Image: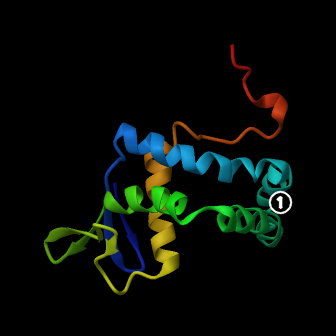
Amino acid sequence: MEFTLNETTFRIAKLDVFQQLKVSRKLLPLLAGLLSDINTVKSAAAQGDYFQVLEKALPAIAHSLADMSEEDTNAILHPCLAVVSRQQAKSWVPIFSQGVLMFDDLDLITMLKLVLRVVEDSLGSFLPELPVSRSEVPAVG
């Protein structure tokens, strides 16, 4: 998939199945922390109250991120960034190699947006929508 972000064109490939498993295992606890506020977030988003969305979602996200180890954080970021290329003239150049971003102009927000795009593209069918209550979680067995 190709898209433009901050006047730069990027191309992302899908994570392979093993990387999808690795990333989803690390993301699920983070997303589970949002379940308690998901109804409020959905309602506010539907009404266009993005301040309330941020007010509810950001503390949960920040807390979950703060609790993540460096290893868990890298287990999400590194595979996602490894499938992103950037258009340079007429060629595509990987933005990440061996744990290092290859472009100095990529800031934190841009990096996180790229990771989000990869997660949406690679795991969107696995995580289409979080359940709004525990009763909507399918029973195992």
Residue 94, image quadrant: bottom left
The residue carrying mark 1 is 44
Q: How many marks?
A: 1
Secondary structure at numbered mark 1: helix
Which residue is pictured at 34% across the width and 86% down the height?
Answer: 104
Residue 101 location, x and y as percent?
33, 75
Q: Is residue 1 left or right of residue 34?
A: left
Q: Which quadrant: the N terminus?
A: bottom left
Residue 64 location, x and y as percent?
70, 61
Amino acid carrying mark 1 in the image? Ala
Q: Is residue 120 left or right of residue 3?
A: right
Which residue is pictured at 69% across the width and 42% down the height?
Answer: 130
Residue 136 location, x and y as percent?
79, 30
Which residue is pictured at 31% across the width and 52% down the height?
Answer: 13
Q: Is residue 140 left or right of residue 39?
A: left
Which residue is pictured at 68% across the width and 68% down the height?
Answer: 66
